[in-house]
């Protein structure tokens, strides 16, 4: 009796059909780019150093090993935060609607995803005629002797990389938990600008590890918890200074600082002005900066 084989249908949740750009940049600290928007997807990966990512009206700090997906049509820009910052940027198109679930936020690349990215780079140097360090790359030219196998390997690795990003996204329940915790964190920090908070006290208050809280908060806001907390303190300080009812020492104490000197130093780091200079500016202009 002849055996009958019944195959399993293998569905495709995404396909990459076009490659618009592929760059490997070693940025200097003073690199400047006017930004752009286009009708294809763009992935940026921070290989070393750190870069500030602008996506529409939001910004995020991308550290080593993190990536960011810009959706088609979103105006975006990138600025290095440190000298000797290296990034990989690639633009691509296809049937990619599923990518919206992981776009618009920093994501950590898994070891497998990094391997796919390295393979894309190594194979691209074999098949593309153009160098990978051009800022403006409007056409990708294949070498005359480009291997079809290498070209398909680039496509397969890019699709595999994108699939790992989709697979690594939390479930709906996990996402809801993270969003709830982040909202509660923000409310807690906003309500306690008069306190001296550390990651240990915040962790104890919420019942989660400091590392997990930092991870979900930064993924959502682009800032660390303490960076956000300090920025809220300084915003409150600016309002108190503008009111003119308290001295710098009193405001420092009201915001939980150990000394007025430390408060003044932190205020200047975030505003580029001392508290007294800020008070004079508000008095002269009537504008809160």
Image (cartoon, helix red, strand yellow):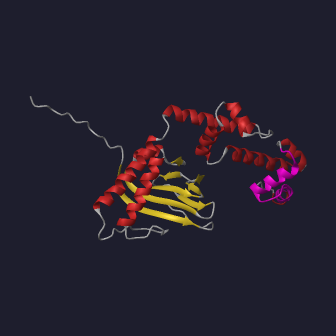
Q: Is residue 120 within the magenta segment? A: no
Give the x, y percent position of residue 50: 60, 57
Give the x, y percent position of residue 49: 60, 58
> Measured along the vertical axis of the image, is residue 227 above or below residue 199?
below
132 or 267: which is nearer to us?
A: 132
Quarter in which the C terminus is drawn: bottom right
Quarter in which the N terminus is drawn: top left
Residue displayed at 40% across by 58% down: 120
Residue displayed at 59% across by 64% down: 84
Give the x, y percent position of residue 241: 84, 50
**Horizontal side, residue 141 vs residue 257: left or right:** left
Q: How many marks?
A: 0
Query: Which residues make up the magenta segment?
Result: 257-282
Residue 246 at least partly seen: no
Residue displayed at 42% across by 48% down: 162
Residue 145 at least partly seen: yes
Task: Spot the residue most to the left.
Answer: 1
> Measured along the vertical axis of the image, is residue 288 above or below residue 167?
below
> Measured along the vertical axis of the image, is residue 13 above or below residue 73?
above
Q: Is residue 278 within the magenta segment? A: yes
Task: Spot the residue most to the top.
Answer: 1
Give the x, y percent position of residue 133: 48, 68
Residue displayed at 41% across by 61% down: 122
């Amino acid at each position: 009796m002849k055996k009958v084989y019944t195959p399993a249908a293998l569905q495709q949740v995404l396909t990459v059909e076009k490659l618009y750009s592929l760059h490997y940049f070693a940025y200097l600290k003073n690199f400047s780019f006017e930004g752009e928007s286009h009708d294809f997807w763009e992935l940026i990966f921070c290989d070393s150093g750190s870069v500030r990512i602008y996506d529409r009206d939001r910004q995020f700090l991308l550290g080593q090993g993190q990536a960011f997906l810009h959706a088609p049509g979103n105006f975006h820009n990138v600025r290095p935060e440190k000298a000797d910052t290296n990034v990989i940027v690639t633009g691509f198109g296809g049937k990619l609607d599923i990518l919206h679930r992981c776009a618009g936020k920093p994501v950590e690349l898994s070891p497998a995803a990094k391997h796919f990215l390295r393979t894309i780079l190594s194979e691209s140097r074999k098949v593309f005629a153009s160098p990978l360090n051009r800022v403006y790359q409007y056409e990708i030219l294949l070498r005359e002797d480009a291997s079809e196998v290498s070209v398909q390997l680039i496509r397969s690795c890019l699709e595999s990389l994108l699939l790992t990003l989709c697979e690594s996204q939390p479930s709906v329940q996990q996402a809801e938990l993270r969003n709830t915790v982040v909202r509660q964190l923000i409310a807690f920090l906003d309500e306690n600008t008069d306190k001296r908070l550390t990651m240990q006290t915040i962790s104890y208050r919420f019942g989660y590890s400091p590392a997990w809280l930092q991870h979900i908060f930064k993924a959502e806001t682009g800032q660390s918890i303490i960076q956000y907390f300090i920025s809220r303190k300084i915003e409150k300080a600016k309002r108190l200074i503008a009111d003119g009812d308290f001295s710098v020492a009193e405001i420092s104490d009201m915001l939980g600082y150990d000394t007025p000197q430390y408060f003044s130093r932190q205020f200047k780091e975030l505003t580029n002005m001392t508290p007294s200079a800020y008070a004079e500016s508000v008095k002269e202009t009537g504008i809160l900066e």
